Image: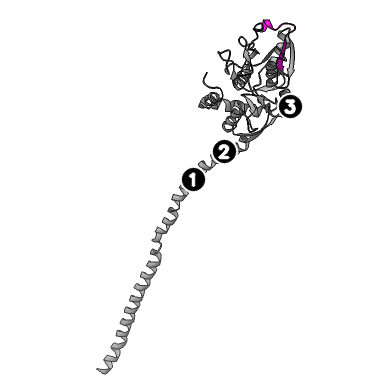
């Protein structure tokens, strides 16, 4: 019996060994299966999917960035500087107030145009007869001071669209034509036909009024550097009459009620005011015309007009 027990031990041992081998095999297989299954974190693909949300956002951004690039390019062309010439002796269009600041309808108009046209400007106060020559030569980019458009002037400079034109009322701000000013006690000078030889008529140098007296009448044209100088001379009796823009005469009478001056008859001419621009600066011309159209459409022009001249 002892011998048989000894024979059984190897069998039992082998069985145990086989059993252990089987267990280890199963464990090994399951372990291998676990590593191959670990790719189940195919969910790891989700992190690549998650960025797809921002990725879509990134795709949307370029379109918004493109206009920004375009507008930046536009801004380079948008802002320009314009050097204007003015004649600050032309109230109520351009004049110096009591503080010495240059003000008036034309200056207020420039402020509005600069905002609507996105340009900045400076201006230089000059005698009226220097404005157009300096614009023509390019020393000035442009000029504004109730400058009347004429065919002769249009051959020398470019003009913007009209910003002030003749109206219906003959004795008011609303008619920029040339008017005839006389003393209140004057009974013989009543219009163009009264401007005969021997009559001294004060005019502002290099204006349409000066040209009118010289070309259309037989009267003697007496030049003055400024309109107010001519009107003061009329009040003092140095000249018999004055031919200058009607709005200027009206303003002078308002501010000097004791000057003894009145307007005789209706407008001698029909005139339109525009901004003079150097012919080479088409960019400025286009900018001003565009801005003028904008402020007319917005109603700002009418507000400025009423502020400086009142309602028609």
Is residue 181 in view from this perspective?
no
Residue at 47% in and 49% down: 55
Residue 43 drawn at (x, y percent): 39, 58
Using the image as rendered, state which of residue 125 and residue 13 is in the foreground.
125
Residue 197 drawn at (x, y percent): 74, 6
Q: Is residue 232 one of those drawn in magenta?
A: no
Q: Disc 1 vs disc 3: which is toward the camera? A: 3
Q: Are marks 1 and 3 in contact (CB under 8 Å)?
A: no
Label 1 and label 3: CA atoms lie apart by 55 Å
Residue at 63% in and 15% down: 261
Residue 70 drawn at (x, y percent): 57, 38
Circle 1 residue: 59
Of the image marks 3 and 2, the number of the one nearer the N terminus: 2
Q: Is residue 218 left or right of residue 162?
A: right
Circle 2 residue: 71
View extreme (bottom): residue: 2
User: SS for tag 2?
Assistant: helix
Q: Which residues are magenta?
A: 192-203
Using the image as rendered, state which of residue 195 and residue 2 is in the foreground.
195
Residue 217 drawn at (x, y percent): 71, 8
Using the image as rendered, state which of residue 147 and residue 204 is in the foreground.
204
Residue at 40% in and 61% down: 41
Residue at 55% in and 24% down: 305
Q: Quadrant of residue 257?
A: top right
Circle 3 residue: 134
């Amino acid at each position: 019996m002892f011998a048989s027990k000894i024979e059984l031990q190897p069998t039992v041992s082998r069985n145990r060994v086989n059993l252990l081998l089987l267990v280890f095999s199963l464990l090994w297989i399951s372990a291998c299966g676990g590593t191959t299954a670990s790719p189940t974190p195919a969910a790891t693909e989700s992190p690549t999917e998650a960025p797809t949300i921002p990725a879509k956002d990134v795709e949307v951004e370029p379109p918004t960035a493109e206009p920004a690039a375009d507008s930046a390019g536009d801004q380079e062309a948008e802002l320009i500087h314009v050097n204007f010439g003015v004649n600050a002796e032309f109230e109520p269009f351009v004049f110096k107030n009591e503080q010495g600041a240059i003000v008036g309808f034309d200056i207020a108009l420039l402020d509005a145009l600069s905002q609507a046209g996105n340009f900045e400007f400076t201006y230089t106060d000059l005698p009226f007869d220097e404005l157009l020559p300096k614009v023509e030569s390019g020393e000035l980019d442009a000029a504004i001071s109730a400058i009347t458009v004429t065919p002769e002037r249009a051959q020398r400079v470019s003009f913007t669209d009209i910003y002030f034109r003749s109206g219906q009322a003959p004795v008011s701000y609303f008619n920029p034509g040339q008017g005839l000013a006389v003393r209140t006690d004057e009974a013989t000078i009543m219009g163009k036909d009264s401007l005969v030889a021997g009559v001294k008529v004060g005019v502002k140098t290099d204006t349409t009024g000066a040209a009118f007296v010289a070309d259309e009448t037989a009267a003697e044209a007496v030049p003055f550097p400024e309109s107010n100088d001519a009107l003061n001379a009329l009040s003092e009796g140095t000249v018999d009459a004055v031919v200058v823009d009607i709005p200027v005469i009206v303003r002078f009478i308002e501010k000097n009620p004791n000057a003894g001056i009145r307007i005789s008859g209706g407008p001698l001419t029909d005139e339109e005011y525009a901004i003079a621009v150097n012919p080479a600066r088409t960019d400025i011309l286009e900018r001003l015309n565009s801005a003028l159209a904008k402020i007319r459409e917005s109603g700002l022009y009418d507000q400025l007009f009423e502020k400086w001249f009142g309602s028609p």
